[in-house]
Amino acid sequence: MTNQAERTQRALGLVFSILGAVLLGLGLLQLVVWWNGQLSGLTIEPIVVPLGLIFLLVGLPRLLEARRVGWLRRHGVTASAEVLVVASTRIVIDKRFPVLQLSLRVEPQGSEPFTTELRWPMGMQMLVPGNRVEVRCRPGRRRWVIPV
């Protein structure tokens, strides 16, 4: 993932997570503190609590993914991988980075080769089956792979 796409994903994850936590917290606080056992008229809880949950469900996976990518960039093992399949997901980040579905055979030194699939925003490089690419991985965790 390019630096710009990484920053966008991290920023979106952070904004959505904070917004979700605030909305969920406010809705639950109002529900617990001011609810007297009766719902008279339209109150804010039926709107704010589900919205908070939705924002959290959207933001947290992006934050966790950004954290995983950061860990792999700092501590991951560099390995060679063969591109097996490249498919379009029809998703574009920042109107410049198409997200591709990749199937890779990763061959880390000193470990057994393994096959994994991942979605990754690509820059301008062209990937075709049979090409070799450098990746960073965490041996033992097949889902922890990112292109270099």
Image (tube, grey):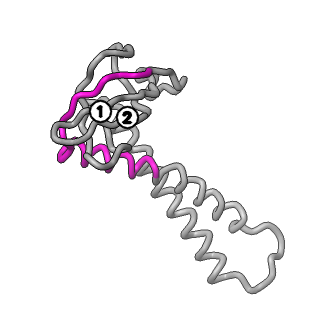
Q: Position of residue 137 (x, y in %)?
A: 26, 41
Taking the view exactly as shown, the residue that stands out farthest to the bottom is 36
Secondary element at tag 1: strand
Q: Quadrant of the N terminus?
A: top left
Q: Up-down: is 138 above or below 33?
A: above
Q: Going 59% across and 59% down the picture, which residue do you hit?
A: 53
Q: Position of residue 26 (x, y in %)?
A: 57, 69
Secondary element at tag 2: strand
Separation of residues labelled 1 and 2 (CA atoms)? 6 Å
Please give the range of residues in magenta: 61-85
Q: Please give the residue where the numbered disc 1 appears in the rendered image.
A: 106
Is 24 or 72 nearer to us in this picture?
A: 72
Taking the view exactly as shown, the residue that stands out farthest to the right is 41
Taking the view exactly as shown, the residue that stands out farthest to the front is 112
Q: Is residue 60 rendered to the left or right of residue 78?
A: right
Tag 1 and tag 2, C-beta contact below 8 Å: yes
Q: Position of residue 51 (x, y in %)?
A: 63, 57
Picture quarter containing residue 2? Answer: top left
Q: Up-down: is 48 above or below 5?
A: below
Q: Going 33% across and 38% down the picture, which residue do you hit?
A: 7
Q: Please give the residue where the numbered disc 2 appears in the rendered image.
A: 115
- Is the magenta region chiefly helix, strand or loop? helix
Q: Amino acid at mark 1?
A: Val
Is 117 or 63 nearer to us in this picture?
A: 117
Indicate which disc, 1 or 2, sits on the residue closer to the N terminus. 1
Q: Going 33% across and 48% down the picture, which residue do you hit?
A: 141
Q: Amino acid at mark 2?
A: Thr
| Residue 69 lies within the magenta run | yes
